[in-house]
Amino acid sequence: MSSKQVSHLPVNDNSNGWSRILPQRTPKASLEGSQTTDWVVIGAGFAGLAAARRLAENRPDDKIILLDAGETGENASGRNSGFAIDLPHVVGSSMDELEGSHRYMALARAAIDYHETQIERHAIDCDWSQPGKYQTASSEQGVREMLEPFARELEALEEPFTWIDKADLDKRLGTSHFKAAVYTPGCRLLNPAALVRGLADTLPENVALYENTPVTGLETGARIRITTPAGEVSASQLILGVNAFADKFGFYQRRLLPFAANASLSRQLTAAERDAIGCEEIWGVTPANAFASITMRYTSDHRILIRNNIYYNPSMRESADYQAEIGRRHKRLFDERFPMLPEVNMEFTWTGFICLSQNGAPGFGKLADNVHTSVCQNAVGVTKGTAGGMLAADMACGVDNELIGYMQSLGEPNLLPIKPFLGLGVRARLAWELWKARKEV
Ligand SMILES: Cc1cc2nc3c(=O)[nH]c(=O)nc-3n(C[C@H](O)[C@H](O)[C@H](O)COP(=O)(O)OP(=O)(O)OC[C@H]3O[C@@H](n4cnc5c(N)ncnc54)[C@H](O)[C@@H]3O)c2cc1C
C-alpha cells in the first residue's frame, strides 16, 4: 500500500479564448461526502473523458466516478490549437520508422473516429470540420530540410498529399509569409473547449462527473482511497488521466517535462477585412518546426489563431503580465503575416500546460494491478490522449484490442537527469532547436 498527499494542483486563470467565445456553462457539482465505486478516473481532459466513456461502454453495470480539479474545457484539452492530426509530425524513412508511423496513424485515426461518433451521436456543436492542414515552411532552408523530406516520407507511406507552391499558397491563406506547403487532407479542426464540454455533458448514465474537485490524497493498494476537500472515494480500480500532474501523484517521477504553450485568438474580422485577405473559408497551418514557429488557423467565425512560444515550465503557472507580453508578441507575428490588417487585435491570449517526455513516449498502461494510466501526450493529445484513454480502459477491463500493442510500442518516458541539470539541459536543448530553426519564425 502506498499513500501520497497531492499538494500541487491545477489553477484556472479564466483566460481560455475558446471557452470565452462559447455560451456560459454551469459546471457539475463538486464531490461532497463519501462514495464507493467500481472505478475512479482522475482528470477530465481528452484522456480521462475517453477512459470514463470506454469503461462505461465495456462495463455498463459498473459505477464510474470521474473527478477533475477544475471546470470542463479549461484544461489543456480545452486550450489547445484545435488540430486533430492524423499523421505523425516527423515520419522518418527507415522501415521501422515507417511501421511506427502506420501504428501511430492507426491510433490517431481511431481517436478521430471516436470523436466523430460522439459528435454525431450527441449533436456536439464544436465547429468540427475536415479542411485538412498545410505544413508550411517560411524559409528556403525549411523547404529543403523539412518540407521536402516530409513529402518524400508521405510518399513512402502512400499517404495522399499535395505540394503547394508559393503563389498558390499565398492565395489560399491570404498571406505571402510562406515559401511552400505540404497539404494533407486528413486533419480535423475544432473548437477544443466546445468538444471537451460536449463530451463531458454527454457521458453515459453510469459515469458521475464531479468538477472543481481536486484530489488531494491518493492511497493505492487492494482498494483505491481518494481524498478531496469535501469528500472521499473508495474504488476498486483507478485510471489516471492527469497529464503533467502525474508525478504529483507519485507516478513517472523524473520522467515528465511540463511545458507551457501559448495561443491567441484575434477578434472577428469584418467583411471588409475578410475581403482584404480573400483566402479560403477556413484553414489550419502547422509549422515545419513545431518548437520554433507558429501554428495558425482561420476559424469559421473569422478569427485568426496564433500559437507560439513553448517553454519548460515546471511550476505549471503563468502570470497575467507575461501573458500580456505574449499577446503583444503574437500581435507582432500577426502583423508580419497580415500587414493589411493593422487594426485587428488579439482579443484573447492564454497559456496551457502540456506534458512532454525526452523520448516522445507517452505514459500509458498498467502501473499496478488496479491502476492504469494515459498521461504525457507530447502535445498531440486531441488524438493521442483520446486513444490512450480508451485503450487504458480496454486494458483495465481485459478487452482484446490490437491498438493496445500499438500504444505500447510508442515506448515509456525516459528517466531524466536530476535537478538542476534537468532545467539547464532542457533549456539548452530548446535554445538549440530555436537557433537551428531561426529562419522559420
Ligand atoms: C496552446 C496549446 C496548443 C496545443 N495544440 C494542440 C493541437 O492543436 N492538437 C493536439 O492534439 N494537441 C495540442 N495541444 C496539446 C493537448 O492540448 C494536450 O496534449 C492534451 O489536451 C492533453 O490531454 P490530457 O487529457 O492528457 O490532459 P489535460 O487536458 O491537461 O487534462 C488533465 C486533467 O487532470 C486534471 N487534474 C490534474 N491534477 C488533478 C488533481 N489533483 N485532481 C483532480 N484533477 C486533476 C486537470 O484539472 C485536467 O483537467 C496543445 C496544447 C496547448 C497548451
Image (tube, rainbow, N blue to C red):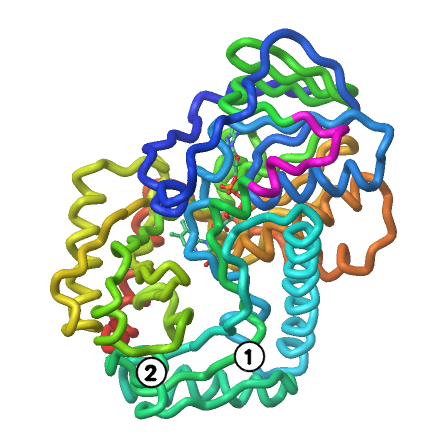
Question: For residue 428, which quarter of the picture?
Answer: bottom left
Residue at 26% over, 78% down = 175
Q: Is residue 122 magenta?
A: no
Query: Would residue 74 be found to the left or right of residue 392 on screen?
Result: left
Q: Name the residue that disc number 2 marks.
A: 142
Q: Give the residue at x 67% y 16%.
A: 233
Identity, as a three-letter code, of the amino acid under mark 2: Gly
Q: Disc 1, ligand 1: is the CB inside 8 Å?
A: no
* Residue 195, image x, y percentages: 54, 48
Label 2 Cα neighbours within 10 Å, binned few <14 / some 14-19 / many ≥20: many
Identified at 33% across, 55% down, the residue is 310
Counting from the top left corner in percent of width and height, residue 224 is at 71, 21
Q: Is residue 53 above or below residue 163?
A: above
Q: Relative to residue 227, is residue 110 drawn left or right?
A: right
Q: Which mark is residue 92?
A: 1
In front of the other: 139 or 306 = 306
Q: Residue at x 35, y 51 (%)?
A: 261
* Residue 307 locus on image (x, y percent): 33, 59
